[in-house]
Image: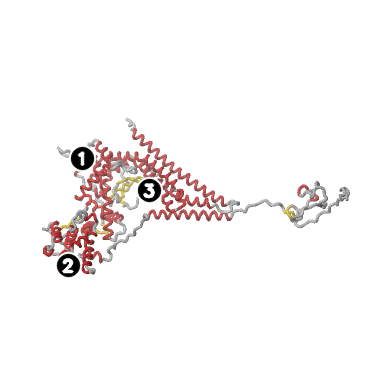
Amino acid sequence: MRRTPSGGAVIAAVRALLAVALLAGFYGLVVVLVLLWVGFLVLALWGSTQPTATTPPTNVILLCAAFAPVIAGMVWAVIRTARPAGPPAGTVWVSRRGAPELWAVVEELALAVGTRRPDHIRLTTEVNASVTEDGSFLGLVPGSRTLYLGLPLLAGLPPAQLRAVLAHELGHFSRRHNRFGALAQRGTAGLEAARQAIRDASSANDLVRLYAGGPLALVGLYARVFRRLTRPVRRRQELEADREAARVAGADAVADALCSTAVLERLWPEFIVEFLVPMRRARGCVPDDPFRIFAQMAEAPELRELLAEVLDEAVRRPADPDDPHPDLATRLRRLRALPAAPDVAAPHADGPPAPAAAAAAAAPAAPAVPARYAAELGRSLCPGAAETIPWRDWLALLAAQRATRILTPLADAVRTVEREETDGERTGPLTIHRVLRLVDSGRRMPLARALNARLDPAESAGREPLEPLAAALSVLIGAQLVAGGTAYWAMHWTGPGTLVPPDGLAPETIHSWAETAVQMPGQTQRLGLHLAALGVAERAPLPDRAEAKASPGAPRDEVRSVSITPGVPEPARRRIGAIRALALTVLLGVTGLAYLLWSGRDEPSYYRPPVNNWTQTPGGGVPGVVPTYGLPTGPGLPTGLPTALPTGPLLPTGLRPPITGRPVPSPPRPSIDIGSILPRQTP
């Protein structure tokens, strides 16, 4: 029985055809613009060769130079759309020998969804997974397949959810979504590249800025219409891939994977900004496997409430207009409406689990990836780091860095109060003795005020004035215990590191000792006895902080320049420089070629009357004298008589002067006496 296509499938096919037609129209528009530009260029060069041209056509040359960056950007957009994009920067190719477990899982899922396996697997630093097929003719002809898998997903998702993500991506291949997906992705990327080229050309050239608004608005409208046509088709394809993944991995696993991915997408940028980058600046080192640290962060108990809020926000958030994926609530609702697959049934609460559920429970752990891939991608996250250390040591440094960051403002506050007390600045490292001496001498309130002034207002808001001082003193005591090797700092992802004291001592005990010494005068001696029992010397400096400041390889504090001008990224700066070079090259090249053609043109020929060799004057005769050929002239002549004989072709042949190289004497002329026939004047 032949299946009749549904109305949604027909509408999707019509939209796909319209998108193809629109993309072809974009190609035609670019071809027309290129032909117009070439026509103007030919017109400029042709005008330079005309004999009547007094100067080269500078206006047309300037017009060609001004339009060259925009035309070049449009051509580049077409090239980018028509050819495969290639692997993006910051990805690592995974060989079959390098990660056999990952390749085995991918091949198993490809067989389950009914498609051929991908030809390449590349790891990325994004919380995302995608598939591409580098086919020719806008992706309509099959080509090499590539699976892109983000290491944050590989490290942060349980095995069942990771299999659901991989089945979803391979489901695009089984439903042949890659053909239209490649076309839509390349078309969107090409139109965006054209818009960016016009913006860059407008920033680099004042002439382009005069007219860039029109082309930018046209390409922007074109891109908006293209997205409106392709977005419903791509979102329909995402829902179909969800159904294919649910058939293979189970609807519950797909739904859990979607929720976990939404949470990890929010958590990963904060992990980079809040932990990786500050540690690189402070210590100059990065971990060899930051993705494993990120996985521990995602499983931290103190973040469970926060992650639940993030998930709730993700479910309520509508879909981004530029995102080809539907909103999360729609995808979850569609997955819940799917019937349970017989081979992927959920476990029963009142009986033994189904065979598929038992197999899933006995499934192996997530496929392992060699550490060298994680180290290579980790270095690309924080370029410029001086050292790469094991991730466990880096995590311990991070905990210590976050726990002891209050000691820097405490040291500044101690120096400030001591300078006011002795009218001079004391030098030396921060010690417990210096803090306790100020507390015993009645300077605890000035010390507390000086410390609170150096803290973030959010940290001291709603607290008693002496509470930050007590907390700083307990951190100073804990740092001495850690320096002595009897305690260590445990990572806390929402606050400072937590001190794990020696055996038999609770973490709150040291804080209560410090709080008693600060709040109640005269209790510092009892605190000294407790410290002596723990083997802590009050006058001992902190060796780790002193070595970090004295080490020649330690990074210095970065000097930042403040400017109200928005910064230009390095890729944009390179593009703007290339556009300026292109416009200048076209201007100088066309100007030089037009000048050469103009200087070698033929001189114009104007009409000149012939020169008569007989008289050496144009038209014959003496210059300024009208020939009379012997006829009398004077005031007594009748007005109707001619005063000169005609010259030129009207003369008889014998009277025409021969054309020779020297003057010819005049032939004898007959004399005519007309005096007898003229009336005489009566006196």
Q: Which residue is mark 3?
A: 85
Q: Could you tell me residue 124's position as x and y percent?
A: 30, 50
Q: Are marks 3 and 2 in contact (CB under 8 Å)?
A: no
Q: Which quadrant of the rendered structure holds the N terminus? A: top left
Residue 140 visible to an observer of this rendering: no
Inter-mark Cα distance, 1 to 3: 40 Å
Inter-mark Cα distance, 1 to 2: 66 Å
Q: Nearer the viewer, residue 89 or 575?
A: 575
Q: Give residue 539's mark.
A: 2
Q: Residues within 10 Å of mark 2 (few under 14, many from 20)?
A: few
User: Which mark sits nearer the N-terminus, 3 or 2?
Assistant: 3
Q: Are marks 1 and 2 in contact (CB under 8 Å)?
A: no
Label 2 is placed on what type of residue?
Answer: Arg
Residue 438 visible to an observer of this rendering: yes
Q: Residues within 10 Å of mark 3 (few under 14, many from 20)?
A: few
Left or right, residue 540 beside residue 31: left
Q: Which residue is mark 1?
A: 356
User: Which mark sits nearer the N-terminus, 1 or 3?
Assistant: 3
Inter-mark Cα distance, 3 to 2: 64 Å
Q: Could you tell me residue 536's position as x and y percent?
A: 14, 64
